[in-house]
Image: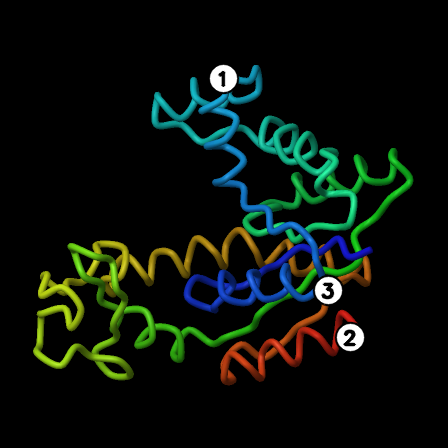
Amino acid sequence: MNKVVLLGPPGAGKGTQATRIAAKYNILHISTGDIFRKNIKEGTPLGTKAKEYMDKGLLVPDELVCDLVEDRVMKEDCANGYLLDGFPRTVFQAEHFDKFLKEHGDELTMVLDIEVAEDILLPRMIGRRVCRNCGKPYHVITMPPAKEGVCDVCGGEVYQRADDTEETVMNRFKVYKDQTSPLIEYYTVSGKLKAVDGAKDPDDVFAGICELLGE
C-alpha cells in the first residue's frame, strides 16, 4: 500500500507525474487545494475555519492544514493508498503528520522529490502561454501556435499568465526553496526521501519513479 508525498519546485511536472502515479498504482491523488475547496463548499467545521482565514487574506495555520489533510486521508477512498501533493509544506506539518500516522500504526512509504535546476525550469515556465478562450496550452519554443498570439483551435487570444512572468517565477522558486529545503533535510534524515531527475523526458521521469516505487 503506497502512501507517498510528492515534492518538487514549480514547473517540475508534479501534476503530470501525480496523475500517472495515481493511475498506475490505483491510489488517490490528494492536493491541499482540492481539500480546502471541498470542505469550504460543503461548509464543514474545518472548512468554515479555513475560510475565515482565507477571507482575511491570511495563511491557514499549520495546525488547521494538518487537521484538514488528516481528516481526508482517513476517508474510505484512501484505504488503498494516496499521493499527497502540496503537503506538507513545513517541517511542523511533516512532524505533525508523522505523529498522526504513528498514532494510527502507519507511516509514509516514500517521499518523492522531483529535482530540476532553476536554469532549466525558468525558460520552461516563462515560455508558457495559454488560450484565454478555450484554455489550450502552448509554449513559445516547444509548442507555439501556428500564428503568433492566436489559438489554433478556437482563434482566441494566446497570452502569458501573470504567474508565468520571470519576476513571479523567480519569487515562486525562492518561496519553494525557503520552505522545502528544511523538509528535504527532515525526510533525508528519516530515510524516506528518494530523488528523481525531473529534467529528463516526462516518460523517463515516470520510469524512474516506478523504479523507486516498485513495479
**Which residue does the numbered mark 1 point to in the structure image?**
43
| Sequence order check, earlier mark of 1 and 2 | 1
Q: Which label is found at residue 191?
A: none
Q: Do the numbered discs 1 and 3 sit on residues whose CB atoms are within 8 Å? A: no
Instruction: Give the SS element for disc 3.
Output: strand
Q: Residue at x 72, y 43 (%)?
A: 78
**View extreme (front): residue:** 153
Q: Residue flagged by tag 2: what amino acid is it?
A: Glu
Left or right, 144 with respect to 9, comes to: left
Identify the image quadrant of the C terminus. Answer: bottom right
Q: Which residue is mark 3?
A: 193
Q: Name the spot of residue 164 as percent of width and height, x first.
A: 27, 61
Question: What whole-number distance in Å separates the C-alpha atoms at marks 1 and 2?
Answer: 40 Å
Residue at far right of view: 105
Q: Residues within 10 Å of mark 3 (few under 14, many from 20)?
A: many
Q: Residue at x 43, y 53 (%)?
A: 175
Q: Which residue was labeled with disc 2?
A: 215
Residue 54 in the image: state x and y as whole percent: 40, 26
Above/below status of 193 relative to 77: below
Inter-mark Cα distance, 1 to 3: 36 Å
Say if 157 sits above or below 209 in the image. Answer: above
Q: Residue at x 47, y 69 (%)?
A: 12
Estimate how packed mark 1 is, as few (under 14), some (14 to 19) or many (20 or more) residues with alpha carbons within 10 Å: few
Q: Which is in the foreground here, disc 2 or disc 3?
A: 2
Residue 94 versus residue 23 in the image, above or below: above
Label located before the other in sequence (1 or 3): 1
Amino acid type, residue under disc 1 in the picture = Gly
